[in-house]
Image (tube, grey):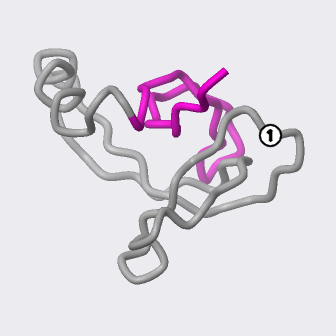
């Protein structure tokens, strides 16, 4: 089963990465304390685990890292899902 599901909200901070304001895909920042609500879509699939290595390679490892992050669906139920966050150098 694969499906896109509109999510009620995800709380995060974003950053324009140079092209994100033109394409609608900003950098997600997981390390910030100041966050605001964004409406996002979540891709649900029972086959996704078979493709994580390819997706991770596409996203790259120097700039982004896949992490678990909380979201709330349209019914108000909380879930955890993967999102790619910008890697911040120590």
Q: Please give left or right for residue 37 compared with residue 66 in the image.
A: right
Query: What residue is at 80 percent from the left and 40 percent from the top?
Result: 32
Q: Measured along the vertical axis of the image, is residue 40 above or below residue 46?
A: below
Residue at the right extreme of this rendering = 34
User: x, y (%) of residue 40?
Assistant: 51, 58
Q: Please give left or right for residue 47 compared with residue 33 in the image.
A: left
* Region rendered in magenta: 63-90
What residue does disc 1 label?
32
User: x, y (%) of residue 21?
Assistant: 48, 78
User: x, y (%) of residue 37?
Assistant: 75, 59
Dot 1 falls on a residue whose secondary structure is: loop
Crowd band around label 1 with a 10 angstrom C-alpha radius: few (<14), some (14–19), many (20+): few
For the image, the number of numbered tags is 1
Magenta stretch, overall SS: strand
Quadrant housing residue 89: top right
Quadrant of image for the C terminus: top right
Quadrant housing residue 22: bottom left
Query: What residue is at 45 percent from the left and 70 percent from the top?
Result: 18
Query: What residue is at 71 percent from the left and 48 percent from the top?
Result: 12
Quadrant of image for the N terminus: top left
Which one is nearer the viewer's eye here, 14 or 62? Answer: 62
Residue at the front extreme of this rendering = 90
Magenta stretch encompasses residue 76: yes
User: x, y (%) of residue 52?
Assistant: 21, 21
Residue at the bottom extreme of this rendering = 22
């Amino acid at each position: 089963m694969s499906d896109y599901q509109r999510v009620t909200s995800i709380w995060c901070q974003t950053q324009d990465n140079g092209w994100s304001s033109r394409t609608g895909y900003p950098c997600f920042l997981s390390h910030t304390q100041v966050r605001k609500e964004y409406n996002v879509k979540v891709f649900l699939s029972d086959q996704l685990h078979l493709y994580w290595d390819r997706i991770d390679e596409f996203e790259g490892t120097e700039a982004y890292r896949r992490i678990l992050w909380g979201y709330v669906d349209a019914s108000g139920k909380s879930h955890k899902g993967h999102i790619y966050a910008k890697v911040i150098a120590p």
